Structures are given as C-alpha cells and as structure tokens.
Amino acid sequence: MLANTRERLLSLAVRCYPEPWRARHGDEALELADLLAQDGVPFRSTTWSYFKGAARERLLRARGRRLAAGAAALVAATSLTAMSLLVSVPPSPAGAASVVSAVVTNRSDAAAELQALFDAHHFDIVIEQLPVSPSLVGSVLGTEALEGSRGGAGILGQVTGSCAGGATGCTQGLLLPSHFARHMVVLVGRAAGPGEKYAEAADIFRPGELLAGSGLLGRPVGAALKALERSHVVVLWQVSGKKDCSVAVPDSWYQVAGGFAVSGLAICLKVAPPARETRERG
C-alpha cells in the first residue's frame, strides 16, 4: 500500500511539469528518484523537490500575468493533492536534505536558465560559457571548485540526456542538495562565433555535427578530399599514432577513422591504414 502511494505521488509530481519537459525528462526523472532512494535520499524530499521544480518550469515558460497565474494555480492545486497524499507517507528523518534539480530546458538560453535557478536557491555558483561544436551547445561541460569555497555538501549527480542535434549522452543539468554551500563555476557550452576556436568538440560524425550523415567515415582520404573540396572549411589531418593535426595530406589509401572540428572554419580528420594493410605490415 505504501509503495503504491509513493508511486502515485511521484507520478503526480512528474505530471506537473510542462509536456515538453515530460517528453524529454519524464522517464529519466522516475529512474532518478529510484536511484536517489537506493542511495538513502528520503522519498518525501525527492518528491517535494520535483513539485517545486515543476512550479519553476511552468512559471519560467509562462508568458504574461494570465499564463503565470494559471501555472501557479495549477501547481498549487496539484500541490494540495500531493500534501493530502504525503500525510500517509512516514515522515523523513529530521534534517534530511531535499534535492534541487537544475536542468537545462532551453539550450539557446542555457546559461541564463541555470544561473536563475542557482540564484533562486542562493547558491554560490556562477556560469562560465565556452565556445563548443554544435552538438554540445547548451550542455554542461563540467564544474570547477574555486578558492574560498565554504565546503559543505557536494554535487549529488548529473542529469544526462539528448544533445543538440539528437545525439545522446550530454549532461543537461546537476543535482544539488538544498544546502549546497560550495563556491563553484559551472561550465556551459555556447555557440561559437565565426572562426572562433572550440574549447570542446564532439566527434564530427555524430548527429548535429558538421559531417553527420556524410558517409565519409571509413572512406579513403582521396574520396574525403573530393567530397570536402566545396565545403569551405580547412581540412587538417591526424594520422594514427600522432598527437597533432597537420595540413600535410596523408596517403590517399588511408581511411577516415573519425575527427573533430577545430572551429566552424576548420576540421581535423583522423585517418589510419585499412585494417588489412595494417595486418600485412604487422
């Protein structure tokens, strides 16, 4: 009976989020709640943080007083229902920490969205934006603790999901305890300016990147050159076993094995001898 009540309450909390958010993060939110429970985070704290997150999402998306009022009323109504269910759930241990889920929902405005969430919880966290390749725009790239940190509880985990362009495995947000007290910088990817060098780049063949769907992966260098001759990008080469990219074109029979973008105007393709050729030389 208790388990069913908890499942109903958690499902209700997730349903309070806007539909676009549920489509992207709904299943992940349910799985995350289960993982947090396994780690000893009180169920009541996790669920209540979801209700508060839903309120923020709806109010951020609302446009104008009328929509904002409607969103607040909806969340208030569902919160009252939640409270009626919560009374049947055993109380959490005294002093148990609630979880703040800071998740990007608008990649084009990721830095401002996260900063607003951090400020709303009075976290000593600042955002630093770095130029990145297209599929990493709006993703969390990492965190850096700064001198003078007050210590306290650390990051509870990361929220991963889809990347810009449709790839998977990008970090979309952080899970923090409500009493988070560290002085920290969160690095967020932004679109690079014309010719601006990327601070971080994903594989150039994955969805959202320059050569996604190009069919050049595994093709000989000669074929790649022909296909890229009208691309208006500078092509560099990284031969297997080498660390640096070079303008020197490798043998035409080498095959494209991967690559990354240096900027919007230059790419570096990784090449290697065909597997058969490698075996014969070995």
Image: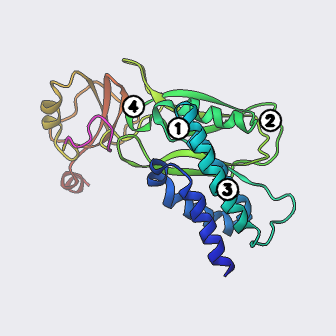
Rendered image: mark on residue 149: 2
Residue 126 image position (x, y, % from top left): 67, 30
SS at mark 1 in the image: helix
Residue 64 image position (x, y, % from top left): 54, 30
Kind of residue at disc 2:
Ser
SS at mark 4 in the image: loop
Rendered image: mark on residue 79: 3
Q: Earlier in the sequence, mark 2 or mark 1?
A: 1
In the image as oriented, which residue stretches furthest toward the front?
A: 66
Q: Are marks 2 and 1 in contact (CB under 8 Å)?
A: no
- Residue drawn where x is 67% and y is 49% of the image: 52
Separation of residues labelled 1 and 3 (CA atoms): 19 Å
Q: Earlier in the sequence, mark 3 or mark 2?
A: 3
**196 to the left or right of 258:** right
- Residue drawn where x is 45% and y is 48% of the image: 20
Q: Which residue is tagged 1?
A: 61
Which residues are the magenta region? 207-214
**9 to the left or right of 22:** right
Q: Earlier in the sequence, mark 4 or mark 1?
A: 1
Asked if the magenta segment contains residue 110, the reply would be: no
SS at mark 3 in the image: helix
Viewer-nearest of labels 3 and 2? 3
Kind of residue at disc 3:
Ser
